[in-house]
Amino acid sequence: MLAVITASGLGSTGCITIAGGKLEPIETTAPSDPATIEYVVGDFEFTLEGGKMVTSNKAGRALSDAIFTTWKKKGYISDFKYAGESGFTNQGEHRLTLSGSQYGDSSIVAQIFSGLTLFVIPYTVDTKYDIQYVYENTRTGARCSAEVVDSYHTTVELLLFLAAPFSTRGINKTMGSMGDHIYDQLQRECGFGA
């Protein structure tokens, strides 16, 4: 997420993220034989300040990739693959469909003013997620869903590029927490990963 932007060649801006912390930490157990999953983006909406964005599918893919990357690192899955806008292939046994919303709350005026001052004046974005994954096992017929709500806060400013080593801690913590809760719910509801 570190957005290092050159503003007319005069300097760099950076961002720092802070996790929303709505989800309590939980203990999860990785399976002994992690599976490969296939996913699609279903009814997912990405809005920024109330305006629906045309990049909803892309935002849903980025969100899913972030969550499934944490799953792969923790050993919950061996790999993941986006099935494409045309839908699932006949090869995938473990299928996940994302739905829900991502909302970015930020002042457009503050963003413009920040840009005009070459990012000396910071602006903020509060990103909120209300998401659901529906899981289907094509071999066993098991089907269940998991839902989470969480957020993170981003501050963008000229000198925050100095915080590069820490800039993504908030978003990474949020993605990890959401991923743990989704995995735990799917594991308890229909034995995903067992």
Image (spheres, rainbow, N blue to C red):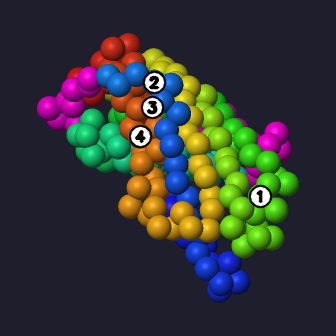
The label shown at residue 23 is 2
Q: Can you tell which of label 2 and label 1 is closer to the viewer?
A: 1
Q: Can you tell which of label 1 and label 4 is closer to the viewer?
A: 1
Counting residues from the start of the chain, the first of labels 1 and 4 encountered is 1
Question: In x, y percent, where is residue 99?
Answer: 60, 32
Counting residues from the start of the chain, the first of labels 3 and 1 encountered is 1
Viewer-closest of 81 and 76: 76
Are the residues tagged 3 and 1 within 8 Å (C-beta)? Answer: no
Q: What residue would you read off at disc 4? A: 173
Give the side of residue 99 with respect to residue 82, left or right.
Answer: right
Regarding mark 3 in the picture, which secondary structure is present there? helix
Image vertical order of residue 4 relative to residue 40, above or below:
below
Q: Quadrant of residue 141?
A: top left
Q: Residues within 10 Å of mark 1 (few under 14, many from 20)?
A: some
Q: What residue would you read off at disc 3? A: 178
Q: Quadrant of the C terminus?
A: top left
Residue with the most extreme top position: 189
Regarding mark 4 in the picture, which secondary structure is present there? helix
At x 67%, y 49%, the residue is: 124
Question: In x, y percent, where is residue 107?
Answer: 79, 48
Q: Quadrant of residue 102?
A: top right
Q: Residues within 10 Å of mark 2 (few under 14, many from 20)?
A: some
Counting residues from the start of the chain, the first of labels 2 and 1 encountered is 2
Q: Can you tell which of label 3 and label 2 is closer to the viewer?
A: 2
Q: CA distance from mark 3 to mark 1?
A: 28 Å
Q: What residue would you read off at disc 1? A: 111
